[in-house]
Image (tube, rainbow, N blue to C red):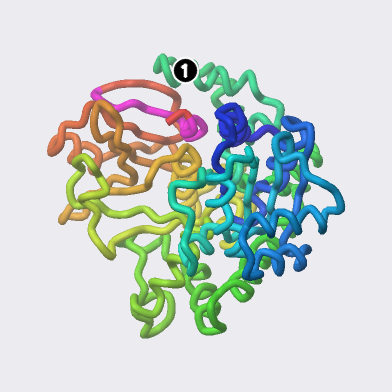
Amino acid sequence: MKRKIYRDLLDWKNNGASKPLLVTGARQVGKTYIIESFCQSEFSNYLEFNLLDRADIVSLFKEAINTQEKIDRLELLVGHKIDFENTVIFFDEVQVSEEVIAACKFFAESKVAYKIICAGSLLGVKINRFTQSFPVGKVRMLSMFPLDFEEFLWANGHRLLVDQIKACFSEDRQMASALHERLLRLYRQYLYIGGMPEAVMDFVGKDKDVLLFDTKILDDIRIAYISDMGRYAKSPLESTRIEAVYSSVSGQLLNVSKKFMYSKVRKGSRSRDYASPLEWLVSSGMLYRSAMVEKPLMPLKSYEKEGFFKLYLSDPGLLCNALGIRPSAIMLDQDFTYKGVLAENYVAGQLVAAGHRLCYWRSENTAEIDFLLSRDEGIIPFEVKAGKRVGSPSLRAYQEKFAPPFAIRLSTKNFAFSTGIKAVPLYATFCL
């Protein structure tokens, strides 16, 4: 299964792999699979240590000896001398050992050309809660996400369609009607299946029929997420609060204000009780946060309004699973309560996977722009429509007030450009 992050891994290798690589991302987005494939294909020698299964290595790095001695003893555990110049070492599930992460400073500064990759399902959480001296500036960070829609098309054997989408996007040229409808069908399949690799593989292996898709795969991933909350939280109380926040997000996507509200997590809940659990979920990659900006000016981060934000689930398939949405509602393009929410959540995931920071704008009189993107030519407003009805009073109001270079409207309509609005089909979001 081809993944875009492979290019980043190659770039790390081709630039000398001088700094250890830390790969973060939620559970089951494919970190172990792609790193194993990369190591096996690109290096003559490869060692992998899953620290969940290697208590001996975890204990070794806890010992009060210098890092060089730890490396010497690691060779004793392996049973042979390690050719570090030509061997890549992969520490998987590294979140269980702060000491291994801290040793990255030694690996980066050593005269020996160590090639180290670390990954873990909750590595982002561990980094944010590091109690030792984190090796700032001594590691390269990469984030991994579920398959975006382009990768989903690759997995389904539609590379030529990807090329056609990119051509139509860059030229504002309409997609052929038959291809447009076919791509909308593929987009709807993606909404229901999502981008978790195991789910996509099951879908592809079952003749790409959503009715044959094993939804238990998504059930199991959600259960694993909840299990992690209990396993890696600081306390049972924090674990309970993390689960409560995660469970409330799908319902809160329908808030009239669109803003996430701590008071809706549980009756009487307050931000001071749930701010840390929420940060845990964002750091884990299970949730994406979009901050509200008071003014759409550069840099956008400087104009974020504290305490005002929206939350999205990391994968549309997991959102459909959590809400119990039937495949027929999506594939037949029926109107249902969460239709708009699902499309907006999908766009959020595509933007995050492309490396964009999420933010939105809301005026005092409730006009709202779903997403803002900072580009060389200025701040570009995005509006998301789940269907073909594309009336945009908020977008027009924004254009009149701030005069952006152009605006983008995502919907199920074909490509076009008119009156300062670039119309982009939802299936082409990855082009942004």
Q: Which residue is mark 1?
A: 168
Q: Quadrant of the N terminus?
A: top right
Write down the quadrant of residue 400 in the picture.
top left
The residue lying toward the viewer, choosing from 126 and 25, is: 126
Placement of 235 over or under 12, stated as above or below: below
Q: Position of residue 42 (x, y in %)?
A: 72, 30
318 part of magenta stretch: no
Q: Secondary structure at mark 1?
A: helix
Determine if residue 208 is in view. Answer: no
Q: Is residue 303 left or right of residue 9?
A: left
Q: Is residue 372 left or right of residue 195?
A: left
Q: Residue at x 53, y 53 (%)?
A: 314
Q: Position of residue 262 (x, y in %)?
A: 36, 73
Q: Residue at x 64, y 46 (%)?
A: 117
Write down the quadrant of residue 123 in the picture.
bottom right
The residue lying toward the viewer, choosing from 88 and 213, is: 88
- The boundaries of the magenta stretch are 419-430
The residue lying toward the viewer, choosing from 216 and 188, is: 216
Determine if residue 32 is in view. Answer: yes
Question: In the rendered structure, which amino acid carries the disc numbered 1?
Answer: Cys
Q: Residue at x 44, y 21 (%)?
A: 169
Q: Residue at x 25, y 35 (%)?
A: 379
Q: Is residue 26 left or right of residue 289?
A: right
Write down the quadrant of residue 35 in the picture.
top right
The residue lying toward the viewer, choosing from 383 and 356, is: 356
Q: Position of residue 402 (x, y in %)?
A: 15, 37
Q: Dot 1, how many residues are within 10 Å of its Cα: few (below 14), some (14-19), or many (20+)? A: some
Q: Residue furthest right?
A: 79
421 part of magenta stretch: yes
Q: Quadrant of the C terminus?
A: top left
Q: Position of residue 377 (x, y in %)?
A: 25, 26
Q: Residue furthest left?
A: 401
